């Protein structure tokens, strides 16, 4: 059995996300070495990074336009070398420096990223956090009355 892929990452198979992240590791290391990290704060803690990689998605974070532009250029060059490209229709930016690469989100105060509503700074909104928390609690409460033991619940 074979599958010809003309563009992008094969969707729906469990190996593709791992392969994507492995292929992106050199870019991830380069971005970490070369560019300043942005601190993302939550209620409990803070984390510093300049990018996020998840499944087949790359999100660049920068404090200013010139850094974001340089990081975008770096990412585009790297993706070209490994045979991938940025899909402008599936990409978005809140900075005009990258509107040739991604759709510009003008006048938008919130947007959806990986199913989570975030504000213009890329921070999940309180309502989004509460929705995820509510769904998680609801699912756990549905599992409690079952006769499954912990091993069966989470395997």
Image (tube, rainbow, N blue to C red):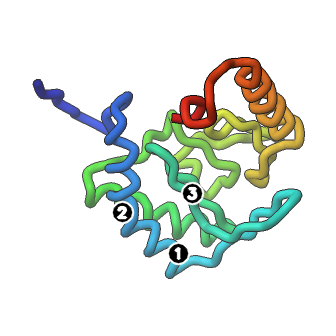
**Residue at image coords 64%, 62%:** 61
- Quadrant that contains the N terminus: top left
Find residue 84 and report its horizontal and vertical position in percent.
32, 48
Q: Between residues 137 and 26, which one lies in front from this camera angle?
A: 137
Find residue 102 and report its horizontal and vertical position in percent.
55, 45
Numbered badge on residue 52: 3
Find residue 118 and report its horizontal and vertical position in percent.
76, 43
User: Considering the numbered disc 1 on the image, is that residue within a helix, a strand or a loop?
Assistant: helix
**Residue at image coords 88%, 42%:** 126
Which mark is nearer the camera, 1 or 2? 1
Numbered badge on residue 74: none
Question: Could you tell me if the residues under marks 2 and 3 are in contact, i.e. CB atoms within 8 Å?
Answer: no
Find residue 26 and report its horizontal and vertical position in percent.
37, 69
Question: Could you tell me if the residues under marks 1 and 2 are in contact, i.e. CB atoms within 8 Å?
Answer: no
Compared with 146, 16 (above or below) is below
Q: For mark 2, what is the residue?
A: 77
- Which quadrant of the view contains residue 151? top right
Please tell me how crowded label 3 is: few (under 14), some (14-19), or many (20+) other residues with Cα within 10 Å: few
Who comes first in sequence, dot 2 or dot 3? 3
Who comes first in sequence, dot 1 or dot 2? 1
Q: Between residues 93 and 137, which one lies in front from this camera angle?
A: 137
**Mark 1 → mark 2, Cα distance in angstroms:** 16 Å
122 horizontally vs 92: left or right: right
Q: For mark 1, what is the residue?
A: 32
């Amino acid at each position: 059995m074979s599958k010809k892929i003309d563009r992008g990452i094969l969707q729906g198979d469990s190996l593709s996300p791992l392969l994507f992240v492995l292929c992106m590791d050199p870019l991830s290391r380069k971005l970490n070495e070369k560019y300043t990290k942005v601190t993302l704060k939550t209620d409990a803690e803070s984390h510093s990074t300049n990018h996020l990689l998840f499944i087949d998605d790359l999100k660049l974070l920068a404090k200013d336009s010139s850094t974001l532009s340089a990081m975008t250029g770096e990412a585009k060059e790297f993706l070209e070398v490994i045979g991938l490209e940025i899909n402008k229709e599936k990409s978005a930016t809140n900075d005009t420096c990258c509107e040739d690469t991604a759709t510009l989100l003008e006048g938008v105060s919130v947007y959806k990223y990986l199913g989570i509503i975030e504000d213009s700074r890329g921070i999940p909104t309180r309502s989004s956090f509460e929705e995820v928390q509510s769904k998680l609690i609801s699912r756990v409460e549905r599992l409690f009355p079952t006769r499954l033991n912990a091993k069966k619940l989470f395997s």
